[in-house]
Structure formats: C-alpha cells, structure tokens
Image (spheres, rainbow, N blue to C red):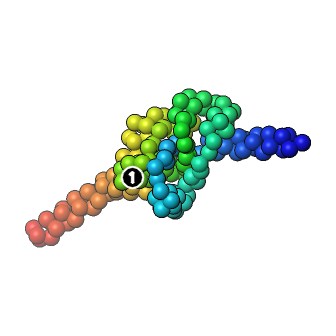
Amino acid sequence: MANAKIIQEKQLAVEEIAAKLRNSSSTVVADYRGLNVAQVTELRKQLREAGIEFQVLKNSLVRRATASAELSELDAVLTGPTAIAFGGDDIVAPAKILSTFAKKNDALQVKGGVVEGRVVDVDQIKALADLPSREGLLSMLLSVLQAPVRNFALAVKAVSEKQEAQA
C-alpha cells in the first residue's frame, strides 16, 4: 500500500514538472554543485524577485517529465545535481540572472534549457542572457517609434524660426 502511495506522489510530481516545462516561456537547467548556502539563498532571492521559480529536482523525475512534454533532447544535460529555473513572462530573465550569477560564482554552471518549447544549449542560453530585458526592448522600440515624430517636430520648429527671422 505504501508503494502505491509513493508511486502516485511521483506521478503527480512528474505531471507538475511537465506542466511547468510546457507553460514556462523559458527554462534554464544549471548545476549548482559547490555553491554554499549563502550563495544559493542569494540566487533564490534574485530569481524570486524576478518571478522565477527555482527548484532542485531529481533527474529521473525530470526525464519522465521531458518525455511527457516531448522535450526529450533536454535529457542530455540532466546529469549530476540539477536545479531548474522556470521563467514567467520574461523570456530573458532566467538566463540573464543565472548567467550573471555564474560569472560571479564559478561553482554555478548553466547546462542548457528550453526557450518557447525548443531545447537550447548553453551557448544559446548565454546569447539569450546578453539580450536586453523585456523593458529594455520596449524602451528601444518606443524610442524608434518616437524618432520620426520628434524629427518632424524639430523640422517644423526650424521652418517656423526661419520664417520669423525673415519677417
């Protein structure tokens, strides 16, 4: 009877992990071996503030979840101690936070992940981390959209000043 209960709990855990893999805009897998408690606490704090869920999970459960979520290519990076950051709306945030933290703490190793349902390697995660955040991209877009209006206003002002000078 106890075995049936344990199996049911594991099946629920696998279903939960598979749902997170499917619903997360980006997921980053990392090896946290060598981090001390204070470092892990700081990393968790940074991720939590960005709305990112960070969990240490058993590789066997994650492998079953990747099979369920049709992301079996991710199994290649599921070796050793594995921590997974499940991102929310901001695709860049998990990669950026983990990559920045890994630069300061050599013990943290980013292994790969999933971005919008596609398995990516560590180089693609690092490239994603180099992108500006969602807010940064929106501000760039806004400045590009405002430029023609601003230039038109400056041209109208220059013409107006020229006409006043001639009068």
Rendered view: 56 above or below 47: above
Residue drawn at the location 55% of the way across and 35% of the way down? 78
Q: Secondary structure at mark 1?
A: loop
Q: Tell me if I can see residue 92 in this picture.
A: no
Q: Tell me if I can see residue 49 in this picture.
A: yes
- From the viewer's side, name the closer residue of 34 and 72: 34
Q: Disc 1 marks which amino acid?
A: Asn
Is the C terminus in the top left, top right, bottom left or bottom right quadrant? bottom left
- From the viewer's side, name the closer residue of 125 and 138: 125
Residue drawn at the location 39% of the way across and 52% of the way down? 105
**Residue labelled with disc 1:** 105
Rendered view: 68 above or below 104: above
- Give percent across and percent down for residue 14: 71, 40
Residue drawn at the location 45% of the way across and 42% of the way down? 110
Rendered view: 167 above or below 3: below
Q: Is residue 13 left or right of residue 53?
A: right
Q: Is residue 104 left or right of residue 11?
A: left
Q: Is residue 163 left or right of residue 125?
A: left
Write down the quadrant of residue 126 in the picture.
Answer: top left
- From the viewer's side, name the closer residue of 22 and 105: 105
- Give percent across and percent down for residue 93: 47, 52
- Give percent across and percent down for residue 151: 26, 57
Residue drawn at the location 59% of the way across and 50% of the way down? 55
